[in-house]
Amino acid sequence: MLRIAVPNKGSLSGPAADMLHEAGYQQRRESKELRIVDPVNDVEFFYLRPRDIAIYVSSGRLDIGITGRDLLIDSGAQAEEILPLGFARSTFRFAAKPGTANGVEDLKGKTVATSYEGIVAGHLADNGVDAAVVHLDGAVETAIELGVAEVIADVVETGTSLRNAGLEVFGEPIMKSEAIVIRRTDADADDAAESKVQQFLRRLQGVLVARTYVMMDYDCRVEQLEKAVALTPGLESPTVSPLHNEGWVAVRAMVPAKEAQRIMDDLYDIGARAILTTAIHACRL
Ligand SMILES: Nc1ncnc2c1ncn2[C@@H]1O[C@H](COP(=O)(O)OP(=O)(O)OP(=O)(O)O)[C@@H](O)[C@H]1O
Ligand SMILES: O=P(O)(O)OC[C@H]1O[C@H](OP(=O)(O)OP(=O)(O)O)[C@H](O)[C@@H]1O
Ligand SMILES: [Mg+2]
């Protein structure tokens, strides 16, 4: 049975459960459940603190896990990213009162508060900067007002938390993060276990594709086919079928959902008609 770690709280937990549900896996019914077995899919889910997931996975007791890239790097655990999942996107940045610093090189002798000591200590060391790091569990934006540190390093999404605290980011982003699937580095799964891991990844990839693409169908004159296909190349190549009316073909291709309206306009302009888009609910590429 495949054993998978899933975030039990915070920004990662809701979207992770939604994605697993969309991929056809049973999920817990209430937030106090610590583990559930999905017998149909031969999978067991363990609901763990997001910060602990890389540690469990690196221990080899759990096969794979969902966590944040920043949390994986912060943990220093022997686990590696095998699939980015596109949610809980954030950047990890230094911030301070305006005028405090312009880059990491200005941090010598200063104190940096963060919940991600591993990332910050590593980044300071990479840049040869000697600064003190204070660990706080959360709400680190307040550390400056209360005099615990001159600088913070934290997750930034919209920047609202920083603005509310009168702080500004400075320097280059330390890293970009999103939810990821992780696995133990150099995992030595036997063939049966490996095929289960690959099936799990294919299911999640299917959800990602279904979320990002729509199916587009349209009719066009044979003379316009090359131009139309250039607009809708599909993932491999579009399906082209003859129509009963001679000189016309029907075309079917997947297109990025964000570009669908623009592509429909462009197709219309070159004479395509009966242009339809439909949602993709699931797929295996
Ligand atoms: N506001 C946010 N927007 C996007 N991603 C976020 C945000 N806050 C945290 N994350 C991401 O969520 C992960 C951290 O999850 P975690 O549950 O530890 O913290 P949290 O979401 O801040 O919850 P809490 O602080 O309540 O424990 C990291 O990968 C981080 O990048
Ligand atoms: O840029 P924003 O959109 O404001 O998001 C970033 C904030 O979200 C998270 O905080 P959370 O609410 O999880 O509280 P915490 O600091 O206690 O973790 C993170 O730690 C930042 O403070
Ligand atoms: Mg938080």
Image (spheres, helix red, strand yellow):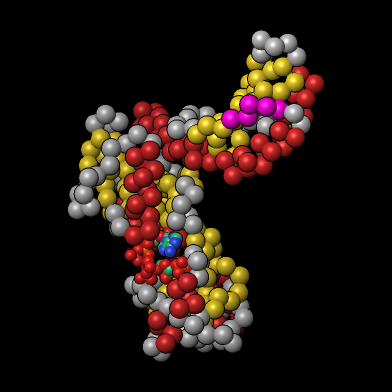
Q: Tell me: 22 left or right of 257.
A: left
- In this rendered view, identify the residue nearer to me: 141 or 201: 141
Q: Residue 179 appears at what percent x and percent y?
A: 44, 52
Q: What residue is shown at x 21% (from left), y 49% (from top)?
A: 30
Residue 175 in which image quadrant: bottom right
- Quarter of the image with the N terminus is top left
Q: Which residues are magenta?
A: 272-276
- Is residue 76 shown left or right of residue 235? left
Q: Out of 164 and 205, give the one closest to the viewer.
A: 164
Is residue 227 visible in the rendered image? The answer is yes
Magenta stretch holds residue 275: yes
**Residue placed furthest toward the right:** 223
Please say whether residue 22 is one of the residues in the magenta stretch: no
Q: Position of residue 133 (x, y in %)?
A: 43, 79
Residue 152 higher or lower than 175, as above or below: below
Q: Is residue 257 above or below residue 121?
A: above
Q: Nearer the viewer, residue 138 or 233?
A: 233
Q: At x 60% / y 74%, what residue is drawn?
A: 171
Give the x, y percent position of residue 166.
Answer: 49, 82
The residue positioned farthest toward the left in the image shown: 32
Place of residue 35 in the rendered image (x, y in percent of width and height, measured from the top left):
22, 46
Please tell me in which quadrant of the rendered image residue 12 appears. Answer: bottom left
Q: Residue at x 40, y 76 (%)?
A: 140
Instruction: Decide if residue 57 is in sight here.
Output: no
Q: Main secondary structure of the magenta part?
A: strand
- The answer to whether 148 appears left or right of 278 in the picture is left
Residue drawn 28% across and 31% down?
42
Q: How many marks?
A: 0
> 134 left or right of 271?
left
